[in-house]
Image: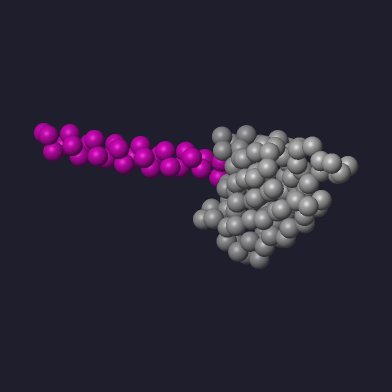
Amino acid sequence: MKSILLLFVLFSTLLFSTAQKYTTHKCKAHTWNDIVSGSGVWSGQLTPIYEKSYFVTPNCKEFNHFTTTNMTFGFIYGDNTNFNLAYTLTLVSNNPSPAMASKSCIFVITAFKPADPDIKILSYHNATCSYKFKEDGAIYYVK
C-alpha cells in the first residue's frame, strides 16, 4: 500500500511540475525576450513591419506600447505567416537630456530561418544599444 501511495505522490508531482512548465509558456510565444536598461526609464513600442505578429506580457496580455526599466515580452507570429516577418523594437530614454532629443535605440528584428535571428541596431543621440541571444529569444540592452 505504501509503495502505491508513494508512486501516486511521485506521479502527481511530475504531472504538476510538467503542467506548471507549460503554464509558464501558455501564450504560445515563438520567443521570449528581455529588455534591460542600464540608465533609468525608457518608453518603448513594438511594431510589426511585415506580416501579422503580436506581443504579449508573461501573463499573456497583448500590448505594443510600454514604459520600463526592465521587462520581458513574448513574440507571437500570426496565422498564415510564411516567416517573411519583421518587427521593430523602439526605445526612447525618459531621462532628461541637455540636448533637445533623447537617447534612442531601434532594433529591427527578423530571421533567416527559425532559430536563426537577424537583428540590426540603429542608435541615436549617444545611446548605447546592444543585444545578445539567449536560449528562447534575445536580451536587448539600452543605456
| Residue 94 appears in the rendering | yes
Quadrant of the image occupied by residue 38: top right
**Residue 83 percent coordinates (x, y):** 67, 59
Query: Of helix, strand and loop, which mostly describes the magenta segment?
Result: helix
Identify the residue at the far bottom of this view. 112
Q: In this picture, is 45 found above or below 129?
A: above
- Judge left or right: residue 29 versus residue 67: left
Q: Residue at x 78, y 52 (%)?
A: 126
Q: Nearer the viewer, residue 61 or 135?
A: 135
Q: Residue at x 30, y 38 (%)?
A: 13
Identify the residue at the far right of this view. 100
**Residue 61 percent coordinates (x, y):** 62, 34
Identify the residue at the far front of this view. 98
| Residue 30 appears in the rendering | no
Q: Quadrant location of the N terminus? A: top left
**Residue 69 percent coordinates (x, y):** 65, 38
Colouring style: one colour
The magenta segment: 1-28
Q: Nearer the viewer, residue 139 or 79?
A: 139
Quadrant of the image occupied by residue 65: top right
**Residue 89 percent coordinates (x, y):** 72, 48
For residue 104: magenta?
no
Q: Nearer the viewer, residue 31 or 132?
A: 132
Q: Residue at x 78, y 48 (%)?
A: 104
